[in-house]
């Protein structure tokens, strides 16, 4: 339901997201790409300042790793947690699409990518790394490598496009299936991991 008197900030944001600067019809693709690239550069810089390596420090970079040992956990291009980032991206798309259905897909994608970048930075702060290691999640965690973090955001973007293609009902069904598969296979998942961090389980 729309409010009768939206505030000026919301109106300005809607105008920027739907028509771009100067009322161009919609935001330029180049600007949206630059915003996504700039956000990922900020994430990479933040992780570098946290002392995270660009690639795995103690073994060659692999396309896929299922190891939860400290030297490999969240260090390679993809791993079981990549599926959780897919779910995160799909969920963010459904949320943003429901909140702002009139926005073009490129504007929604920018919001989703920014959401992923914020999480990647927060996830790799020392207090959150310690929090993850205090929970019963599998293996030991020392933070992401920079390449793993960038790959995580790529998975979020992929989840966005999958959800946009499937629609929210099929996305919800797929998310339940993937979540169950993660819980059975690695005893972790987006929902289960969140509950662990919150101390519920």
Image: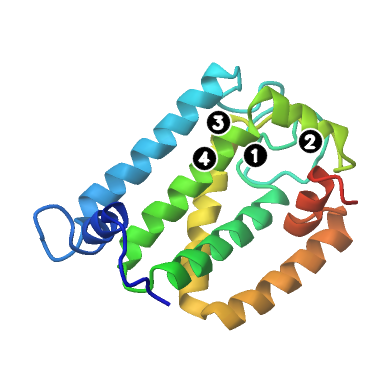
For the residues marked 4 and 2, what is the alpha-carbon distance in whole angstroms?
17 Å
In the image shown, does 190 or 144 lie closer to the viewer?
190
Q: Are marks 3 and 1 in contact (CB under 8 Å)?
A: no
Percent x, y of residue 194: 76, 50
Closest to the camera, between mark 3 and mark 4, is 4
Point 14% across, 52% down: residue: 21
Q: Is residue 184 above or below residue 151?
A: below
Q: Badge 4 is on which residue?
A: 118
Q: Is residue 41 above or below residue 13?
A: above
Q: Could you tell which of marks 3 and 1 lies nearer the N-terminus? A: 1
Percent x, y of residue 16: 22, 56
Q: Is residue 131 above or below residue 196?
A: above
Closest to the camera, between mark 3 and mark 2, is 2
Point 55% across, 54% down: residue: 155
Circle 3: element type = helix
Q: Badge 2 is on which residue?
A: 132
Q: Could you tell which of marks 4 and 2 lies nearer the N-terminus? A: 4
Closest to the camera, between mark 1 and mark 2, is 2
Q: Badge 1 is on which residue?
A: 62
Percent x, y of residue 39: 40, 38
Closest to the camera, between mark 1 and mark 4, is 4
Q: Could you tell which of marks 1 and 4 lies nearer the N-terminus? A: 1
Quadrant the N terminus occupies: bottom left
Point 53% across, 20% down: residue: 48
Point 38% across, 74% down: residue: 2
Q: Are marks 1 and 2 in contact (CB under 8 Å)?
A: no
Q: Could you tell which of marks 3 and 2 lies nearer the N-terminus? A: 2
Q: Badge 3 is on which residue?
A: 146
Q: Are marks 3 and 4 in contact (CB under 8 Å)?
A: no
Q: Could you tell which of marks 3 and 4 lies nearer the N-terminus? A: 4
């Amino acid at each position: 339901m729309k409010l009768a008197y939206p505030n000026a900030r919301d109106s300005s944001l809607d105008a920027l997201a739907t028509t771009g600067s100067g009322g161009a019809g919609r935001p330029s693709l180049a600007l949206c790409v630059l915003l996504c690239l700039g956000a990922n550069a900020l994430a990479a810089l933040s992780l570098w300042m946290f002392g995270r390596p660009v690639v795995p420090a103690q073994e060659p970079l692999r396309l896929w790793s299922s190891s939860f040992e400290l030297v490999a956990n969240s260090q390679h291009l993809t791993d079981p947690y990549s599926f959780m980032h897919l779910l995160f991206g799909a969920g963010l798309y459904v949320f943003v699409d429901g909140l702002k259905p009139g926005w073009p897909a490129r504007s929604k994608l920018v919001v989703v990518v920014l959401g992923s970048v914020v999480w990647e930075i927060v996830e790799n702060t020392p207090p959150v790394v310690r929090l993850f290691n205090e929970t019963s999640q599998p293996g030991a965690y020392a933070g992401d490598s920079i390449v793993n973090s960038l790959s995580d955001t790529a998975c979020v973007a992929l989840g966005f496009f999958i959800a946009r293609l499937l629609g929210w009902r099929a996305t919800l069904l797929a998310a339940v299936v993937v979540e169950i598969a993660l819980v059975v296979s690695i005893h972790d998942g987006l929902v289960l991991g969140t509950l662990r961090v919150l101390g519920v389980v």
